[in-house]
Image (tube, coloured by chain):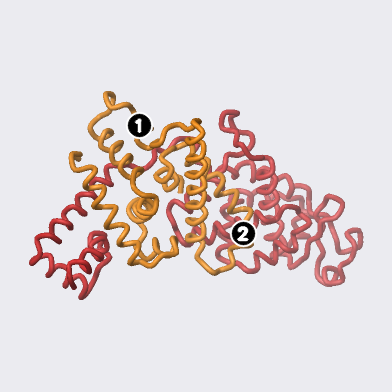
Chain colours: A orange, B red
Amino acid sequence: MVDLAFRLTGDAEDARDIRQTAFLRLLGSLDSLNGTCSFSTWFYRVVLNLCLDHRRSRKASDKRGAGRGADRAESSGPSPPQCTEQEEAARLVAGAVAALAPPERTVVVLKHYQNLTFEETATILGLPASTVKSRMQKALLSLREKLKNVEI
Amino acid sequence: MDCNDIRQEMPAYLYGELTGRNRAELEEHLLACPACREQMDHGRSAMALLDAWPPMARQPEDQPAVVLAGQAGSMRPPYRPGRLRAVLMGAAAAVLVFVVLALASAEVEFTDGRFCLSFGAAATAKTSPQAPGNRPLPPLIHTVAAEVVDDRMDQLASALDEAFIRQDRMQEDRLLLLARTLEIRRSEDLQRFSLLLGECTRAAMEDTFTWVADDSSSRLDNLPPNGKEETR
């Protein structure tokens, strides 16, 4: 879960905060677990909503000039001269994922990094599976275009 | 299937989720359509690129899902850890008491800061704690519960976290059970707690009990003779 939050927020500290908040929300919301969806689905939604709130508040603080930069995932790694090739590739991929449109980024993180099926991803997001696949296709082509010079 | 249909299904194909006739049709189309083949190659290389971004490095403070009281000051959580500790202690105490009750076919009441057991007809008659047939639970139970929780809190927290990471269904059920026990804020709710436990499977309850207090049984065996006799 902390990895999900990390990939969506691009910041390890924020990801840990989100995890903490999600657990507290879990303990406070047991009554809402009424069997209408599985526990996993419910919990994924909690984390995704927290990440969404986080993104909104970060946007607001960036607007006020107090932000820590628009793209944390890209800036969170070591600076390029100190990177190995592998680290540099990871930094570029993280940056490219962070630069995707939020709906596409969410699909990529759930599908590729959380290793969910398209059906599971669609259930969590409340979308048709066909929409999830379209977003994934668009995201993959966009990533390929942005990273075409990256050697792995 | 035309090119649009094929491209719609490409991600499912790349992730091995396209089967049967649809898969065969897509593969057949790819043989005849260079444009779709190129898109498929791009998708495949993008997937490989995504793998270059490793998971977030785990740090020692990531191990417990919830950082608990009594740990190093730098790891002290921003919320009130004492509350969680108290809740966990209550939960573990309740689990211990419940198991004792299950053995003794008895009921429990919490009166004047002490657990009291009622046996047989006395239980159904809801007699007062001082009446014959009622006996305060041996104080050692409290001591054992507190010690067990002290020993187990970190493991519980880690296990909660791991359940989510592994997405293990059984573990999730176990987590739910534990989370439900955490609903018990005060020991006065013991009766409600036993009802909640009754909803859960026996196996889950046994697992949880083993998990929470697996090294307490030997200590329970050392209860004073009176207490041991009364609880069986």
* Disc number for residue A2: none
* Residue in the image at 9% along x and 60% along y: B34
Task: Using the image as rendered, state which of residue A127 and residue A78 is in the foreground.
Answer: A127
Location of residue B76 (image quadrant)? top right
Q: Is residue A43 visible in this depiction of the protein? A: yes
Q: Chain of mark 1?
A: A
* Residue in the image at 25% along x and 65% along y: B8
Q: Amino acid at mark 2?
A: Leu
Which x, y percent locates residue A30?
Answer: 62, 59
* Disc number for residue A30: 2
The label nearer to you, 2 versus 1, is: 1
Pointer 2 or 1: first along the chain: 2
On the picture, is A144 further left or further right than B63? left
Q: Is residue A117 above or below residue B56?
A: below
Which x, y percent locates residue A111?
Answer: 34, 56
Q: Is residue A145 above or below residue B1?
A: above
Task: Using the image as rendered, state which of residue B96 and residue A113 is in the foreground.
Answer: A113
* Residue in the image at 45% along x and 31% along y: A68
